[in-house]
């Protein structure tokens, strides 16, 4: 083979279904687990975060209004595309995380996506209820998506962790702005390329790369963000983020200290965290 | 521009032929130049204190507009309340320039704004097409003025203008101006239907000659509505009018201005093309409805240090 010069990539952000450069014009080098250069990623700024929230807000009525069945189909289609990009994901996960278990991680991530895709049309029956009430009324409780969710993606688990936090949010009908793992953003970028070519409407998932500690406070304080997932928040600013989020009464998904074991079987808690319950009383015909 | 003196301007309007001679004698607009200049000025960065000033100034210049078939007295009342006090949580937000409604809603709007200093503008003259006879247009205007409108937004007869019957358009503006009495007259050129910048310049001059207090880009019902280059051409016209006659006339871009960023671009254009004197609600207005909410959100962002959202301003 001849010594060809490899093409170094400079990736961009994923906002509203498009791939814009960061408004700030900045980018930063992404290294593999041993410090070797992998690619350049865009270094998002607060204005990119603002644009992403705007895109997510715009996409929310369409996505939350789609039928659960339709959302399930769309998400399942994403799993098919993930399958098609398997090799690339395996390579990126292996390089970023320095693990030999790349294949099994990607398999688990795709399986997780399918698992959540299957949940979309079960949410209403599992989290909703026809309440027994003492009176001539029907009383129903219906789960509804919270709205725009800002997600600080797990820092260590760049694909399985990412899928485990993003899939439940969009399966429940929310739209989201994801700040990818700061030092391991490549799987998130590839996931955004998958989403862009899938049937997921633009703006449902927006992916920002850059310094988590720089972008997160703006998302935490943004009045048009309804919930904040702190899973990948740097320890040093976690308390400040919670305080900022309280200013506009956001739902918080706290996550514990350190990252959970993402390989464990998921449960419904991440979906429940971004669902609101609406209870309707309706007079009963006599 | 070879500047005829004021006495010559009165000669210009003597008959159709001299009007045509004058309007077609106006220098042509350099299309590439004006678009490039508009784009360049649009990139100017306005931050911090200047931005705060620009936001407040823009708020005071908004003609808060509702021109829908579905308008109800209730909607007009809420609009008037919002015009008086755009952001109830911040007392220092200035009131807007005026509310802009259809003639039958003027009385409701007048009662709604009370003595707050907010004007009531009414569209008239068979808005938005202007396709009716003079008697109907005059009656339309009289109805709005009698109901208490302080500003009248008339549309010109684009059909007559485009077929070169300038005298007819001129006479009509003069007649409406007379019917306005004490009310200010804004002349809507509907630039989206005039096709060329040269036509925009001619229509601007025609409206100024006929006595329009403001020239306004569009009805908002035709796309494209207001654009920066078109506003540049109109600002040049009022500036040249001032240079010749010493009178100050206003400009109102309307339609399609939705964000604070857009509004600030227009203010920069006003400052650079016409001059600082025009940066006041008596000489520059925005015809808009959704713009006000964005201005208020931006204002809160500046004051509160974080981004605001549509949940924190009124829905209209």
Image: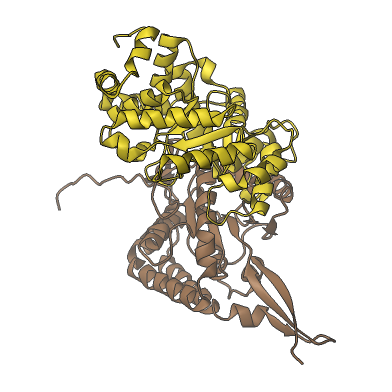
Chain colours: A brown, B yellow
Write the residue at 59% across / 36% down: B145
Horizontal relation, residue B305 to residue A59: left or right: right
The residue furthest left is A2
* Residue at the bottom extreme of this rendering: A286
Instruction: Give the residue drawn at x 56%, y 38%.
Output: B142
Instruction: Looking at the picture, tell me which residue is in the foreground, B218 or A41.
Output: B218
Q: Position of residue B4 (x, y in %)?
A: 33, 8
Q: Quadrant of residue B201?
A: top left
Position of B228 compared to B68: left or right? left
The answer to which of A25 and B61 lies nearer the viewer is B61
B164 vs A17: above or below: above
In the displayed structure, A215 sits above or below A252; it is above
Left or right? Give the position of B78 relative to B161.
right
Nearest the eye: A199 or A57: A57
Question: What is the tally of numbered marks visible in this picture?
Answer: 0
- Residue B244 point in image, percent of width and height: 40, 10
Q: Position of residue B150 (x, y in %)?
A: 61, 32
Give the vertical position of B62 relative to B19 (above or below).
Answer: below
Going by the image, does B172 lie left or right of B86?
left
Q: Dividing the picture into quarters, in which one does residue B84 lie?
A: top right
Is any atom of residue B262 visible in this view? yes
Against A63, residue B59 (above or below) is above
Quadrant (top left/top right/bottom left/bottom right) for the N terminus of chain B: top left
Q: Please, which residue is most extreme toward the right here?
A: A134
- In front of the other: B267 or B205: B205
Q: Is residue B229 visible?
A: no
- The x and y percentages for residue A231 are 62, 57
């Amino acid at each position: 083979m001849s010594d060809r010069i490899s093409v170094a990539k400079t990736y961009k952000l994923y906002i509203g279904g498009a791939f814009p450069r960061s408004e700030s014009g900045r980018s930063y080098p992404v290294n593999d687990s041993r410090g070797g250069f992998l690619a350049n990623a865009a270094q998002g700024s607060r204005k990119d975060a603002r644009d992403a929230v705007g895109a997510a807000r715009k996409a929310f009525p369409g996505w939350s209004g789609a039928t659960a069945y339709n959302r399930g189909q769309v998400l399942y289609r994403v799993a098919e595309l993930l399958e098609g990009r398997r090799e690339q994901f395996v390579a990126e996960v292996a390089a970023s995380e320095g693990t030999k278990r790349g294949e099994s991680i990607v398999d688990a991530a795709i399986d997780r996506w399918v698992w959540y895709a299957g949940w979309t049309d079960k949410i209403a029956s599992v989290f909703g209820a026809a309440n027994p009430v003492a009176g001539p009324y029907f009383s129903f409780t219906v789960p509804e998506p919270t709205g725009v969710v800002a997600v600080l993606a797990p820092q260590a688990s760049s694909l399985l962790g990412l899928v485990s936090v993003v899939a439940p949010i969009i399966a429940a009908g929310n739209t989201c702005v994801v700040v990818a793992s700061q030092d391991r953003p490549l799987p998130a970028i590839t996931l955004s390329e998958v989403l862009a070519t899938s049937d997921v409407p633009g703006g449902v998932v927006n992916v920002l790369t850059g310094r988590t500690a720089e972008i997160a406070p703006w998302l935490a304080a943004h009045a048009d963000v309804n919930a904040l997932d702190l899973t990948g928040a740097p320890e040093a600013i976690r308390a400040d983020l919670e305080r900022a989020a309280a200013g506009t009464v956001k739902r918080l998904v706290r996550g514990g200290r350190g990252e959970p074991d993402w390989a464990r079987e998921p449960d419904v808690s991440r979906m429940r965290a971004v669902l609101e319950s609406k209870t309707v009383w309706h007079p009963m015909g006599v | 521009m070879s500047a005829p003196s004021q006495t010559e301007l009165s000669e210009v309007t003597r008959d159709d032929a001299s009007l045509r001679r004058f309007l077609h004698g106006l220098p042509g607009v350099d299309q590439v130049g004006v678009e490039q200049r508009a784009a360049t000025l649009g990139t100017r960065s306005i931050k911090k204190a200047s931005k705060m000033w620009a936001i407040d100034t823009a708020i005071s210049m908004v003609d808060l507009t509702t021109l829908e078939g579905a308008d109800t007295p209730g909607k007009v009342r809420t609009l008037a309340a919002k015009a008086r006090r755009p952001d109830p949580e911040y007392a220092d937000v200035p009131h807007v320039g005026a509310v802009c409604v259809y003639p039958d809603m003027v009385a409701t709007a007048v009662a709604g704004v009370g003595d707050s200093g907010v004007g009531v503008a009414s569209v008239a003259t068979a808005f938005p097409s202007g396709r009716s006879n003079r008697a109907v247009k005059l009656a339309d205007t009289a109805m709005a003025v009698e109901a208490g409108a302080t500003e009248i937004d008339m549309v010109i007869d684009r059909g007559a203008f485009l077929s070169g019957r300038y005298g007819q358009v001129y006479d009509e503006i003069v007649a409406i101006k007379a019917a306005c009495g004490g009310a200010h007259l804004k002349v809507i050129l509907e630039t989206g239907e005039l096709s060329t910048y040269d036509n925009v310049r001619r229509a601007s001059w025609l409206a100024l000659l006929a006595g329009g207090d403001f020239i306004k880009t569009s009805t908002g019902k035709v796309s494209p509505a207001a654009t920066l280059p078109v506003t540049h051409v109109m600002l040049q016209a009022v500036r040249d009018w001032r240079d010749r006659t010493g009178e100050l006339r206003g400009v109102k871009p309307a339609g399609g201005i939705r964000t604070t960023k857009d509004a600030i671009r227009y203010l920069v254009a006003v400052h650079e093309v016409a001059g600082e004197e025009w940066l006041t609600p008596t000489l520059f207005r925005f015809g808009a409805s959704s713009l006000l909410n964005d201005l208020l959100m931006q204002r809160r962002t500046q004051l509160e240090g974080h981004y605001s959202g549509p949940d924190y301003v009124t829905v209209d």
